[in-house]
Image (cartoon, rainbow, N blue to C red):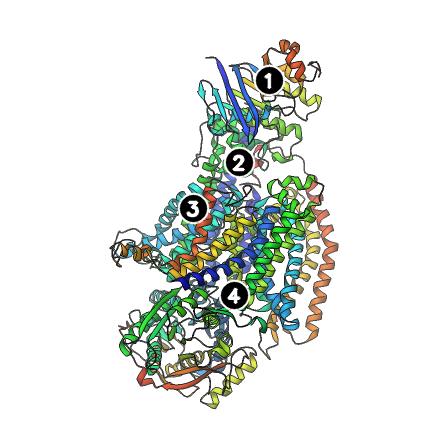
Amino acid sequence: MNKFKLMLLGASSLILSAGLPAATVQAENLTIAFIDALSGPFAATGLGSGRELKHAVEKFLNGKEVAGEKLEVEFLELDGKINPKESLVQLQNAISQGAKYIFHNSGSSVGHALVGAINKHNKRNPDNRVLYLNYGAIDPALTGSKCSFWHFMIDANVDMKVSALVDEIAKDKSVKKAFIIGQDYSFGKAFSAAAKKYLADKRPDIEIVGDQLHPIGKVKDFTPYAQKILRSKADVVMTGNWGADMINLAKSVKEIGTEANIYGIYAYGPGVSAVVGESGLGKLSIVTQGHINPPNTPEWAAYTDEFLAKHPGNDMSNERTVYGVQMLGEAFVKAGSTDPLKVAFALEDLEFTTISGDKVVMRGKDHQMQMPLQVMAHAKDGLKYDFDQSGYGVITTSSIPLENNTLETSCEMQRPS
Amino acid sequence: MSNLTQIRKAENIARKKRLRILWLCFAVILVVLPLLATKFGLTILTQICVASVFALAYNMLLGQGGMLSFGHAVYFGLGGYASIHLMEYVGTGGAPIPLVLTPIFGGLFGLVAALLIGSFSTRRAGTVFAMISFGIAELVAASAIILVGFFGGEEGMSSDRTMGPSFFGYEMIPQIEVYYFAAVWFFLATFAMYYFSRSPAGRMANAVRDNAERAQFIGYNPQKIRLVSFVASGFFAGIAGGIFAIQYEIVTDSNLNTAASGLVMLQAYIGGIGYFVGPVIGAIVMTLLNTVVSGMTDLWLLYTGLLFIGTVLLAPNGLTGLIMMHTDAYRNGKLSTLVKPYLIGLIPLTASFVGIISLVEMFSHRNEQTVGDDVMPLFFMNIDVSTSEAWIAFTILSLAGIIGLRFTIPMVRTAWHEANEALTLPASPTKQEGAKNE
Amino acid sequence: MNNAISLTDLRKSFGQMEIIRGVHLDIKKGERHAIIGPNGAGKSTLFHLISGHYQPSSGSVILNDEEIGGVMPYDIYRKGLARSFQVTNIFPNLTVYENVRCGALWACGHGYSFWQQVENLEDVNLKTEEILEKINLTHRHNVPASLLAYAEQRALEIGITLAGGADVIMLDEPTAGMSIGETEQAVELIRSVTEGKTLVIVEHDMGVVFDLADRISVLVYGEIIATDTPAAIRTNKLVQEAYLGTEVTADA
Amino acid sequence: MLETVIFSLLNGLVYGLLLFLLASGLTLIFSMMGVLNLAHAGFYMLAAYFAYTISLYMGFWFGILLAPLIVGLIGGLVERYGLRQVHQFGHVPELIFTFGVAFLLEEVVQFIWGRDQLAYNKPEILEGALFTLFGADFPIYKMFMLIVSVLIFITLFLVLKHTRIGLIIRAAVGHPQVVGMLGHNVPLIFMVTFGVGTALAGLAGAIAGPVLGTYPGMASGLGGIMFVVVIFGGLGSLGGAFIASIMIGLIQTFAIAIDGSLADVLALAGIIVTEETFMYDIWSTTMPQVAPLIPYLMMVVMLIFRPTGLMGARES
């Protein structure tokens, strides 16, 4: 040991003090944080939905007048790597930088972690609460047994989507065998459970010939799984896969030449539609919210055009992003404030019409948005918006109104007094 | 009594006095820094505490024992998981243990795991050890997904740090209390690791690193020496995991996978593995990159990679090594002669730095596919990337900087040599404690 | 028995090649014993066999009445046998002081201790300083070993070997590559530090051998062809043949 | 049952041979220089990206021809200006350096080509099915991959056995110091070896890109598996690497096809495992879940009990 240690310690504290001011750039008004996968195998999904979210925030929130003051929004993008721990590290970074609203899309395991951490945070810091606006972690438990006052789900949950999916399958009387495949984590398991439950309810004659989980984001070649599907002689494949896992599954299933129809909830969008291409025509159905083709309202078409003009090479595939931001804006006005507690109360049972013309409501008792769902088919003709400039996209074939889509909840909401 | 003995004894007393002052300074810095920090700064400081303990633990292997591990996050992660289980156990009324003691539990768990795995992995050093550690890390990370009971699968394990009995009224609710909790453990662990490095086992770890064969012929079993270091390192990694578990109240497979292991190696190496404090410097730099710089640019990982490669090729002793290069100049009292050449050298360095970073950032901004959004903030300016002037200006700046460096580098080098050359052979016995191998 | 080392029919093969072919040798306690022989005779291999660096193929090695064939080197060291190496084998990044101190740690009984500080181990430090004094490296104690001059490194090599205070010291060509002046100093050093100990030395420099040794063994093609006093070896017929007819003299 | 076996065999073979193509370059470098090139998978990825870009302008075939050459050249430069600098300090700094290169390559690729998956597709002529077996199509492209891999294996084997270069390489594996003694220009040999090794990885990347996807994460999983192949197969053993590759390829595909768990085995023995059973996690773990970790288990066990690997000439 010598004096240079001292110098070192001095230098390190210098580095620190140099770093700290840079870290203190605070929002003037309202800070919104987006935590999602910005790197790794699902980066494409995360970055895409981040761009859509940022655009929506610019359009709907920035400059909006709330209680006589113009909002100035700072938008933080943080890389949660679809990992619960990474996301909580970023949550803490976000909160300490003043974020009040946390948007998040992918990963139900992340969703659970965020709910747990935000519950604790809000309990410990009543003067500095945050809200979690979740538009992609759709494990039904998040608005069921694990529901939280601080969490709002801006997408139909797995049960709602799968119920609609099974309704669609049930229409086809020739279907005799179903194969379920999903990613090995809470969402994939919830999808599988829902598929089994609703198939048993609605078409008990359909035999489930496969119920497969695979590691999330790690399978490079899905051929062995595709071969299993082929061997099971399934008529339909039901999958909750998304991102790279959906792309690669579609590739392999296509390559091996199975006759089965695929029913998914994320089996469309950038990457997927282009890969499935010609061979998927008439064989791929999706249940999701929103309107891609046709856009349903001129406002929505104009909004989409503007987004695409600004982000060439991107696609608009997460309409619920816009719902969430729109809804938040409505709640700010209703509450006359951006204080998360007031806004949370304002959000409960908030009804509004989305930009694409759907009437939706944020159900107060479980914070699950109730919305109409659309059945879409993989298509080539009649598209206004394709994906990846491939000529392929999705087209709405039928709509499921909100009323047919309402499920009971097991949520016992704890509200702050 | 020989002359040397007398000198040593005198130096030893002086050394101990210096050490006491240093430890005191260290403590004071840890206490005072958060008072100056913002909320975000406080979060960063807490992260630095955890990262530093882990990096120091890692360096017990790489720097002091010569064992390159690609899987040391396993012990950090296992310590973290164990801590979460302890928190749950305490929280559900299992035992009234104050949770501020959690890290010691995480450490013990890391120790046991390191003992089990180290018993066979430390038989060899070098590539074989590196690859065993890598394989084990892959195995444990994969198991963490599969074995839901202990690891919680993809979701990991979470708990609540405030559930335990309070520790003299201290409940770790606000962030500042969490920081002081982390800081105290950082101090204790650093203290223990420093004295480990001065112990016979720690010194022999250096010897085995240098020459394992020779160590056998002075009575030491190299495997046992490696094992002792490995187990101690696992213990402190587990402590770091325990602090992490308290801070974030969650531990997942990403705490123990190979990416986490790679990160800690980066930290230790960038900081300088040849010095005791090196890993702390690395942890500070990397944490700032990860929090502050990542908020400024999406390319922070690219810069991290460049920093790392640059360190490996140009400054194998790390950032600490760059500072320690001036030890002799300081002893010669010639440090001040370096100020001028360094300042001159800094000009082209800054120019090329600003120029190249700007070009890289502009390229990336253009690739981001946002039409119409041509103006980007860069080094306190707003630059329009659609104009060729901006590109030309920064290209010229970079080139000028690089050309300037060609002239200034020899000058700086000469100045440095002159400042160091007057050096006579060191005479006092405890200067051996100086730079290397602490 | 008053033999420090006793070898019986010791053999070592590498694949098909038998390098040590049935060596019988008794080295008495307290004697200075040199092993000489032409290049490739197996002198270093014999050293490696005794010190545990290699495992014998067959035969026995007895150190102070205890079989040590196949025992690990560190265990042999702990039974009181220390050795040096022909090719300098030190801890290059440690200082001279630390090199020697490492050699003294085990013998002072500190083992794998991680609860003590080396600075506070007075016995170890005194021993280190005593050895440094003996090998004339006191003034260089703070220099990283890799920066030492060659002769200094050789001296350090011996210092590390001696620091543990073993009864049986084996030195493998301690003066290899030294100048005449350096060699003289080295011999004096070896003589003084091995006072009262058993010394086994392999050496090419016949001056050194005949100067130091009480007895000499001649190893040729893996066999001991003679063991005797220097005077007797000088006139031994077999030895002279082995050295291709050249007379073995002190100035060879 | 038979169809499963045959189909899994075919797929395992394709995957295994791709692994071999990747690992052959790594083995070459490892044998010759003693460096386990941690950036090998990074070069594989880099080549896929290059091949994509070239294919946009000059078509697929130029892509798979030029991309490996470019990557090989980059590899040579990395050796010349990077690895050689740290070589003198030993294997640990070398490993650290290649780790850094791997880290950097992943970032550079994202910096240049972005983070989305690229639409790198196979050419028209290789589209479609070659034959149909039990109702399942076997794509032409897979056969193409198979043929390229086998050709490379044969070429490498012949070069090693019958040329002067091969002689030097074989000598270097057993006795690294020999090469210098023969009066060869060792630095040049190292540079060329590294270049050729990375070019082989590049070839693998260029032909795997269209099937396994061209995206920044494409290297992450494969890198680890490659070390397993090289270490399990043994230092300097092309044959060992070949066997290890095929083994891993087959294990991966069969594990998914089998899809059983210990619980199923116990059930056969009449023991019913429920969620309450002690260590339920272990009993209920299925083969597809375990499949990804089997290679690492193979490597660790091999390193502990036989550090020379399956057919290795000497210890690493």
Mark closer to the observer (2, 3) = 2
| Residue where numbered disc 1 is placed | C34
How far apart are the alpha carbons under marks 1 and 4?
69 Å
Q: Position of residue A280 (x, y in %)?
A: 46, 78
Mark closer to the observer (1, 2) = 1
Q: Which mark is residue B234?
A: 3
Q: Amino acid at mark 3?
A: Gly
Q: Secondary structure at mark 1?
A: strand
Q: Are marks 2 and 4 on the same chain?
A: no
Residue D171 higher or lower than C49, as above or below: below
How far apart are the alpha carbons under marks 4 and 3?
38 Å
Count the labels in the image.
4
Q: Amino acid at mark 4?
A: Leu
Mark closer to the observer (2, 4) = 4
Q: Are marks 3 and 1 on the same chain?
A: no
Q: Which mark is residue D212?
A: 4
Q: Residue at x 51, y 82 (%)?
A: A386
Mark closer to the observer (1, 4) = 4
How far apart are the alpha carbons under marks 3 and 1?
48 Å
Q: Nearer the viewer, residue D37 or B89?
A: D37
| Residue where numbered disc 2 is placed | B212
Q: Are marks 2 and 3 on the same chain?
A: yes
How far apart are the alpha carbons under marks 2 and 3?
21 Å
Circles 2 and 3: CB atoms closer than 8 Å: no
Q: Secondary structure at mark 3?
A: helix
Circles 1 and 2: CB atoms closer than 8 Å: no
Density class for disc 3 (Cα within 10 Å; few <14, some 14-19, many ≥20) is many
* Residue D104 picture quarter: bottom right
How far apart are the alpha carbons under marks 1 and 2?
28 Å
Badge 3: chain ID: B
